[in-house]
Image (tube, helix red, strand yellow):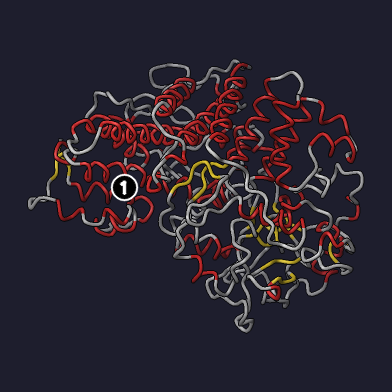
Amino acid sequence: MCYRFKFQFLILINYYYEALIIYSTIVTSIFFSSCSNYLDIVPENDIETIETIFEKREQAELWLKSCYVLMTDPVSSVIVNPAFTGTDEVVAGEYTRQLLTTQHRWQWYGLFIGDGLQMVQEPYANIWKKDLFYAAIRYCNIFFEKIGGVYNMPDNEKALWVAELKALKAQLYFELMRRYGPIILVPENIEVNSDIEIMQQPRSPIDTCVNTIVRLLDEAMKVLPPFMQKDQSRWTYHSLESAATLKAQVLLYAASPLFNGNPAYTNFKNKKGEQLFNTTYDHEKWKRAAEATDEAIQLCLDGGRQLVTGNMSKSTELLNTMMDIENSVVAPGYANNEAIYMIRPQGQSLHFWYSWTLPYFKSTDYANYNASMKGCISPSIKMVEMYYTEHGLPIDADKEWDYSSRYQMGKESSPLYRDVIPLNSDVLGLHLRREPRFYASIAADRCYWQRGKDAAQNLIVKAYRGEQFGTHTPIINNSYPQNLSGYWLKKGSYSNVSTRDYSSAIDNREEGAIIFRLAELYLMKAEAWNEYLETPDAEHVYNPLNAVRERAGIPDVESAWTNYSKTPDKVKTKTGMREIIRQEWNIEFAFEGRRFWNLRRWLTAADELNTDLYGWNILGETAHQFYNNFDGPIVVWSKREFVAPRDYLFPIRSEEVMVAGCVQNPGW
């Protein structure tokens, strides 16, 4: 088999950048800087065979790195991954969509998926194609077959690289599975000679897909070292902890309602006539997921992973907790003790996000103005109201929180909230006495937002029209960037970097894209054991949930519901804890791309994603006008659609279905 090696790598990124990029650019910008001299070893006739590529360690390592290229943007990018913008977490208007369809056609697929515009002709966020994820899988297989022929590297290093790629192959399979359900499996010894023939293979039943992914991870875990024992140059490759976490996540999906006994897939068969789903519910799948999660947590704790906590640099307990929460989701220089798995983001995937979420200040506001900021992707009211009260309860469940007056103005006098809420000033009731994650993640009107290192940069968010944060025009203008909800997103940005200097400070910073963090495992454990056990208990359900809540600065779940809730018995039942755990998921991982997938695996997306998105009247110049006469939020985006059961799985491109004879997903 013979390949033009330069052309191989052009194929790898062609899908996202829609242009041929010369090989030297790929080597320097997509691969690691140490690989920039590969052109020097290409023969004069510009031809490399698979056999000659796998003669030397240096060339084999280039091949290994190429396997990661195709995964990075679809998984880590807030721009390309639809999970970040495809639910009801954020609001973006016509300006954003029109700009993206003309200037950034390959970005923000989630907005269009959330609007119900997914299609079979050219599916948004399409990774089911021979030159994307399946190309990476094929590259992994070739690596497995040929790595033994490399003469200048020891066997233990070969085994490590194979284990890293087995975990990567499992991750590629999983990303395909959670989008499409049953997928085409490509074992190492497949007897086909082209990508077209691979795509013509039948889809495998979902249980076979799950077991294959788990087997790959089990094999990898026998060799992979713990994260802290890996050389720093390999931090963005899989470790023992990350493989165990992925295994637990795969089994959690397999146990969840979407894939476990779903009657919507009763007649879903592949082209061989095999049933692709077992529509009989299997309760034991929850136990398998729970035990895998227990194992992953223990490996993480043994390996030094811990929740980010203990900041002491701020003047109040609340501010310190908010800083812990901020630091839990960022990894400057790949430093984050909570992160289980990070990858090196490509292009503008991480840093480009801030230019759409940070505020659009007037050019006359010299201390804060940054021309690249648009501030036109903002949190929805649903997410604002989803965060807990200070007692760690939903706002409608806390008997001491004034739910009926949440849309009226109030005041805060407690010094506990100093520098978070202006004391003894008019603030909307909805913004008072909320949990630390709310204040760490959401910038709300008349609350403080630290926008730099200095005390003078702790700005009060003034969101009325004509104010510092408010819109600058008297109408909703589709040709102008506007924040439509009246809230700004803090999460994922740095409070100690000013808006004016943000681009210069952040753009060239090495930063890992966090794929898994320890808090996720705790919530997975609580969910899986709660579903398996008849009644929740402390060891399996309450304790892991409380680990997350403790870092969040709220009471443990039993105390919160027993002492402050209107329904104290809710915490004692499986059904009650299911709702509690799901809301904890939604809060802890808000704006991190989890809700998109969780609503699907829980089979609740049809209930959640067919409702309008709400905000405030951003054209209002007074509190009375801005807050809609204090009568409650207004609709700011209504083009929402989720069709069940069709939209629970992505469509396979119609041309792919015709050419490969592949069975399309139900409803498409």
Q: Residue 196: in sight, yes or no?
A: no
At x 17%, y 42%, the residue is: 3
> On the image, numbered disc 1 is attached to which residue?
12
Q: In this view, does 583 lie above or below 317?
A: above
Q: Can residue 652 be seen in this view?
A: yes
Q: In this view, does 154 lie above or below 254?
A: below
Left of 552 or right of it: where is 601? left
Above/below status of 600 relative to 350: above
Mark 1, secondary structure of its residue: helix
Q: Which amino acid does label 1 sit on?
A: Leu
Residue 30 percent across, percent down from the top left: 34, 54
Measured as percent of width and height from the top left, residue 435 is found at 77, 51
Q: Quadrant of the N terminus?
A: top left
Quadrant for residue 548, please give it.
top right
Q: Outermost residue toward the left?
A: 44
Q: Residue placed at 74% from the left, 66% from the top?
A: 448
Tell whether 552 sits left or right of 371: right
Q: Where is residue 17 in the image (x, y as percent from the top left)?
A: 36, 56
Badge 1 crowding class, 10 Å Cα cut-off, few under 14, some 14 to 19, many 20 or more, is many
In the depicted view, which residue is nearer to us: 278 or 27? 27
Front-most of 506 and 573?
506
Residue 612: x, y in percent?
70, 50
Q: Tell me what residue is drawn at x 59 percent, y 22 percent.
A: 291
How many numbered marks have been drawn onto this rendered protein structure?
1
Left or right of 553 on screen, residue 265? left
User: Is 434 left or right of 651, judged from the image as shown?
Assistant: right
